Image (spheres, rainbow, N blue to C red):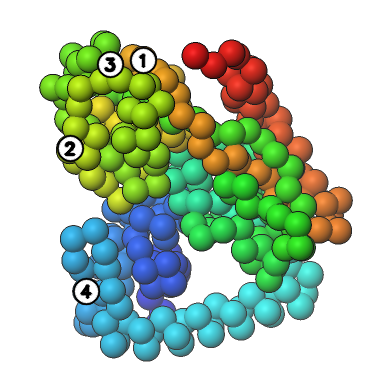
Amino acid sequence: MRHLPSLAALRAFEAAARRQSFKLAAAELGVTPTAISHQVKLLETELGLRLFTRRPREVALTSEGRSLFLDLRRAFDAIADAIRARGGGERGGGERGGGERRQTATLAAPASFAARRIVPRVAAFRARCPGWELRLQICDDGADIGAGAADAAIGHSAGGDGAGLAALPLYVDRFAPVCSPRVDVRRPRHLATATLIHCASSPSWRRWLEQRGKGRLDPDAGLAFGDPDSAIRAAVAGRGVALASLTLAAPELESGALIQPFGPMLEGPRYDFVAPLGGEERPEVAVLRDWVVAEFADETAAFSAAAQKPKG
């Protein structure tokens, strides 16, 4: 009789090793980074091996971890091939109790967008699309769906002529100052004494100040974060004012955990729904497109209306 570790622990380790990140693995599997860390620790304890070297804000595979990852990836690939050969797998789905077959649609998206805007909507997908399962693929460096890793993607202006991709524009992202209502920032002049929160993927405070046209503040001072989630969490915690994506900060703005005290807003990149050119009517692509368009219809309309307002 085979003795195997927990499948959940193996899946968590494989995703974390492939992504080199507990956070990205958590977004892919629809769990929390703490859950990934817990499963990896269980696996390390059972094997008596250290699989990751943990550092602040990053993890790295040990030699034992890399060896296990390579073997495990081959084993998972073999399982996927066996299921696919029998009509299942990524394109065929599985079965529910009673023999009802479920198809799988795989959507690629950047980690922050997936965690903040897609994961909370998974239940809505299942309700709207009975018989389908939604699988998320984290894709931070462009919608690389040509190889078939995903059926479609949501990304920043990810489509393009000559790329073999068809892009359906959704809306243009916008960035604006946001802060906790506990922070005493109600007018732009209050920024002079506030802590500015910076994010590498957001427009700079210097650009915001240039668009505003006036103001007394040091646009380079403050706290810097490498990802939008950390910057938004810092703003919620009252650590300062973030120049944040209104798309990614929408949950906190809707709940009141953050406020947008003033403008101006800066135009950011456009979000597109992207699919392989010529495959737009495949069932997997069609179900994802129809759901995304319906799910983000209000947001798209709001951003379109904002774009049509006179500037100034």
Which badge, 3 or 4, comes first in the chain's sequence? 4
Look at the numbered disc 3 and give the secondary structure of its residue: helix
Judging by the rendered image, the residue that carries numbered circle 3 is 188
Which badge, 4 or 1, comes first in the chain's sequence? 4
> Which amino acid, by three-letter code, is at mark 2?
Gly
Alpha-carbon span between mark 4 and mark 1? 44 Å
Tag 3 near tag 1, CB within 8 Å: yes
Alpha-carbon neighbours of circle 3 within 10 Å: few (<14), some, or many (≥20)? some
Residue beneath the point at 69% across and 80% down: 82
Residue beneath the point at 45% across and 39% down: 116
Which badge, 3 or 1, comes first in the chain's sequence? 3
Which label lies toward us, 4 or 1? 1
Alpha-carbon span between mark 3 and mark 4? 44 Å
Q: Is residue 30 left or right of residue 289?
A: left
Which label lies toward us, 3 or 4? 3
Which label lies toward us, 2 or 4? 2
Alpha-carbon span between mark 3 and mark 1? 7 Å
Look at the numbered disc 2 and give the secondary structure of its residue: loop
Which label lies toward us, 3 or 1? 3
Judging by the rendered image, the residue that carries numbered circle 1 is 262
Alpha-carbon neighbours of circle 4 within 10 Å: few (<14), some, or many (≥20)? few
Relative to 1, is 270 above or below?
above
Disc number for residue 104: none
Say which quarter of the image contains residue 152.
Answer: bottom right
